[in-house]
Image: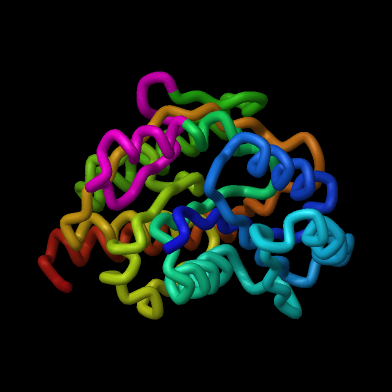
Amino acid sequence: MQNRLIIVPTFNELANAPILIERIFKHIANSHILIIDDGSPDKTGEKIKEIQSKYPATLFLLERASKSGLGSAYRTGFAWGLERGYEELIEMDADLSHRVRDLKKMIEAKELQPNTDLVIGSRWVPGGRTENWSKSRELLSRAANLYVRAMLGMGVKDSTAGFRIYSSSILERLNLEAIKSEGYSFQIEMTRAVYKLGGKIIEVPITFRERENGVSKMSKNIVREAMLLVTIWGLKRFLRVK
């Protein structure tokens, strides 16, 4: 059984994904990378194919015809990794906002607590922080996560975080086909699903850096989707509806 698979969705990340790949292979032992590219017009997929010649046994590429959503990419990656027997499946952004040094911290935290089902790289626990964010964006993220805690009662400080390590055992227990969210609501829904199964969740402080190259995928529609779904899930919780 392979140790860990790092799943990296890409869309127009030509300037960033190759740098991330090299950093991971340099600093994270016993790891494989799966790039899921959604038909990037900037030829990200073509560049990954070039890099594969250097790492033929540890770098994999799934190409999709068009942009199909973050949640869809991770569901595809989880299924791919579980079929191949990986013990840990990791979510990581391609835009260099997630630091490889923080991934090492997260892996070490899981090694110290091997029964952990989900490790979240958290911006909002003590020691976590962001770089190059406006005050308004920080307040929006903090407020959104406060709302999630109030509505869903999970106690997780950063439910919207996309920097994560899942154990294969918890993913095998989840009904991934029932996880329908896209955007960042996918992260909240996955956290909720692990929590409802009684999975152990820990948060490790990280530094989230705003991307330097490319365009952010965040939009008002993504935020609206997340808040609407959290409201629905919260009402179901208060009304004790499954």
Residue 69 % position (x, y):
60, 68
- Asked if 159 appears above or below 136 in the picture, the reply is below
Stretch of the chain drawn in magenta: 105-127
- Asked if 217 appears above or below 37 in the picture, the reply is above
Question: On the rendered image, what quadrant is the C terminus found in?
Answer: bottom left
Q: Image quadrant of residue 203?
A: top left
Which residue is at the far left? 240
Say if residue 187 shows up in the picture: yes
Q: Is residue 85 magenta?
A: no
Q: Residue at x 45, y 30 (%)?
A: 105
- Asked if 75 appears above or below 228 in the picture, the reply is below
Q: Is residue 124 magenta?
A: yes
Residue 86 % position (x, y):
44, 63
Q: In the figure, is residue 46 to the left or right of 140? A: right
How many marks can you see? 0
Q: In the figure, is residue 15 to the left or right of 176? A: right
- Asked if 80 appears above or below 159 in the picture, the reply is below
Residue 1 % position (x, y):
42, 63
Q: Residue at x 23, y 55 (%)?
A: 195
Q: Residue at x 83, y 52 (%)?
A: 14
Residue 134 % position (x, y):
63, 27
Q: Image quadrant of residue 198?
A: bottom left
Which of 226/95 is in front?
95
Q: In the figure, is residue 33 to the left or right of 120? A: right
Q: In the figure, is residue 227 to the left or right of 138? A: left
